[in-house]
Image: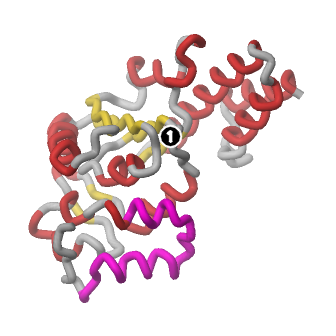
């Protein structure tokens, strides 16, 4: 295990985990994933001593690596399970993708800046995260959207969770599309109860003020499955 940085007021990995628990992060799997991913390798060398401090740090292309609590909170809220295929929009240095990879079957992460994508891909390969695929794309890229609209014969390849550093609404819509595709497949297979339960779970991620065409379609499908 790499040496734990202890600069920036003595904030090392142990204190970092204690702080997350104190602030309400309770999922054991999420805490274990955060403990297993060496954050110091995902920040610029000059900030290595501050890697575990609870603040965002600058990376290339004018972007930042999110503060640890934000990463922990978003990850816990996703409720990722081992069978999930997860989409991340906004790779950055690859830290969030690495954390998700400890929880999911596969992570596809997209980044619009090729420099960041290339560096993250190399970093993730070097550190040993084989279930992460890094793509250069925008959140509106049709090749990316294909994962949310799979062929029914390959429905298990769709994204079951989505997270975004920016454009969270787009990420949620992608996840909802994926859930609807899978629900329709299960409906044809006679698994109406499973389909309704899974789709209701995905639709519940939307706040009441986030009314979209996709959410209205999901509610209509839930009515059909009742």
Residue that protrudes farthest toward the front in the picture: 1
Residue that protrudes farthest toward the bottom in the picture: 9
Residue that protrudes farthest toward the right in the picture: 226
Q: Is residue 82 visible?
A: yes
Quick one: SS at disc 1? strand
**Residue name at image x 15 percent, y 47 percent:** 126
Q: Whole-percent x and y of residue 164?
A: 44, 45
Q: Is residue 165 visible?
A: no
Looking at the picture, does residue 70 appear above or below residue 129?
A: below
Query: Any magenta on residue 226?
Result: no
The magenta stretch spans which residues?
9-34
Q: How many marks?
A: 1
Residue tagged 1: 162
Q: Whole-percent x and y of residue 209?
A: 70, 46
**Residue name at image x 20 percent, y 51 percent:** 127
Query: Any magenta on residue 25?
Result: yes
Looking at the picture, does residue 212 appear above or below residue 45?
A: above
Q: Specify the quadrant that holds the N terminus.
A: bottom left
Image quadrant in which you'd find residue 112? top left
Looking at the picture, does residue 51 appear above or below residue 137?
A: below
189 or 202: nearer the viewer: 189
Q: Whole-percent x and y of residue 223?
A: 86, 27
Residue that protrudes farthest toward the left in the picture: 46
Q: Whole-percent x and y of residue 72?
A: 46, 63
**Residue name at image x 49 percent, y 24 percent:** 157
Looking at the picture, does residue 67 appear above or below residue 85?
A: below
Magenta segment main secondary structure: helix
**Residue name at image x 55 percent, y 50 percent:** 78
Image quadrant in which you'd find residue 113? top left
């Amino acid at each position: 295990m790499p040496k734990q940085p202890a600069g920036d007021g003595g904030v090392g990995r142990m204190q970092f985990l204690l702080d997350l628990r104190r602030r309400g992060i309770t999922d054991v799997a999420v805490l274990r994933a955060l403990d297993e991913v060496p954050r110091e390798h995902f920040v610029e060398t000059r900030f290595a001593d501050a890697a575990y401090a609870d603040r965002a740090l600058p990376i290339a292309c004018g972007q930042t690596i999110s503060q640890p609590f934000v990463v922990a909170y978003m990850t816990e809220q996703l409720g990722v399970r081992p069978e999930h295929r997860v989409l991340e929009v906004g790779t950055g240095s690859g830290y969030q993708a690495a954390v998700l990879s400890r929880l999911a079957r596969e992570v596809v992460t997209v980044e619009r800046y090729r420099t960041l994508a290339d560096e993250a891909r190399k970093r993730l390969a070097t550190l040993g995260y084989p279930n992460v695929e890094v793509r250069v794309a925008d959140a509106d890229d049709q090749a990316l959207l294909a994962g949310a609209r799979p062929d029914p014969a390959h429905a298990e390849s769709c994204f079951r969770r989505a997270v975004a550093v920016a454009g969270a609404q787009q990420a949620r819509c992608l996840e909802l599309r994926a859930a609807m595709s899978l629900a329709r497949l299960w409906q044809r297979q006679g698994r109406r109860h499973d389909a309704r339960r899974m789709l209701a779970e995905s639709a519940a991620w939307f706040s009441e003020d986030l009314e979209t065409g996709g959410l209205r379609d999901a509610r209509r499908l839930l009515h059909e499955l009742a």
